[in-house]
Image (cartoon, rainbow, N blue to C red):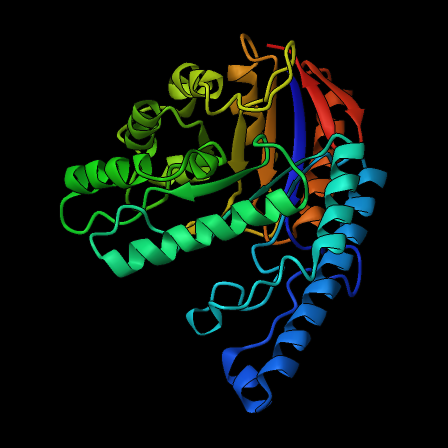
Amino acid sequence: MIVRFGYVAMSTVIPDCSPSKTMTMASFNKLGDREAGLRKLESIARINLHNTLRLLKHNAGSDIMVYRLTSKLIPLATHPDLADWHPLSALAEEFAEVGTYVKKHGMRVSFHPDHFTVLSTPRPEVLASSIRDLQHHADMLEAMGLPATAKSNIHIGGAYGDKPLSAARFCEQCSALPLALRERMTLENDDKTFNAVETLEVSRSLGLPMVLDIHHQWVNNEGELPWELWPEIQKTWTSSLALKDVLPGEVLPPKIHVSSPRSPSDPRSHADGVEPAPLFAFLKRIAEGTPAVDVMIEAKLKDGALFGLMEAMTELAQGGNGITVLNGASVNIQA
């Protein structure tokens, strides 16, 4: 089984390379000149896209082919007071440059809209805001010229006092979305509300691929072991929505998220790095019957955690254990 490791948005290795520089609405209003403010926002976005390209080059040099883009590339992009602002046309060249680099190097990139994007909500205004946010992410991926294999990952959302009703509402409101949004979506189990079993049920119902977060599954489960769910989770990656724009003869590897608890007293928060033993145990269990899987590291040290994990994998490989290190960010694991 080929395992590729990736990380989220920021680098702790490359200095002064934030792709998430921002401006608050309060600072925007203080400028007193709306057009000047919009140009300032676009200037910040150009810096973010430039730094994104720098990070992608860093990734390519380190064999990192899996990367989550920050949702904050364009500051205030979905703020309701700026609804008449359409920055993507002004930033077309920069977005295209990022997308060209991604495609040239065969990278897998994604977004993870924030927790305010909630399709299970009973409130129409929250639903409208959530759809606007999903559309914004899809528009950015379109501006990069990336196919539907570049996706936005979301959680089901809140239970609102009735989890089955909320799951049904999610399914109804998700099904009503344009196909162009649904084909770019994946669903992930969370650490407090919708566990892996419940998320898998919704994923199968909607034909959406499921991202298994093994840390979330550990702190929020029904007694199942994560690899027991894997055969059914893997099947969600063969749905028509999952395979949109996948070339004939190719596959889109399933994706999982991994992080480690910060401490026994704070098991839900993420540690700086990733404890290799639980991850390796899971990967070993699913290796038979899984040709490839992509692992998104959600540790505080970002790419630093990835490099630390690869050092641990190299040590495991030197001791046998059925691991072969392929390059700076991927391994082959035998069952």
Could you tell whether 66 is left or right of 75 in the image? right
| Residue drawn 68% across the image and 64% down it | 45
Residue 175 location (% of width, % of height) = 31, 34
In which quadrant of the rendered view does residue 71 lie? bottom right
| Residue drawn 77% across the image and 54% down it | 13
Q: Looking at the rendering, in which quadrant would you find the N terminus? A: top right
Q: Looking at the rendering, in which quadrant would you find the C terminus? A: top right
| Residue drawn 42% across the image and 35% down it | 182
Residue 222 location (% of width, % of height) = 26, 30
Above/below status of 187 relative to 33: above
Residue 269 location (% of width, % of height) = 46, 53
Asked whether the viewer can see residue 263, the reply is: no
In which quadrant of the rendered view does residue 186 lie? top left
Front residue (pair 102, 311): 102
Asked whether the viewer can see residue 290, the reply is: yes
Could you tell whether 317 is left or right of 288 in the image? right
Front residue (pair 119, 226): 119
Q: Furthest-right residue in view?
A: 61
Above/below status of 241 relative to 12: above
Residue 79 location (% of width, % of height) = 46, 68
Could you tell whether 101 is left or right of 83 in the image? right
| Residue drawn 81% across the image and 39% down it | 60
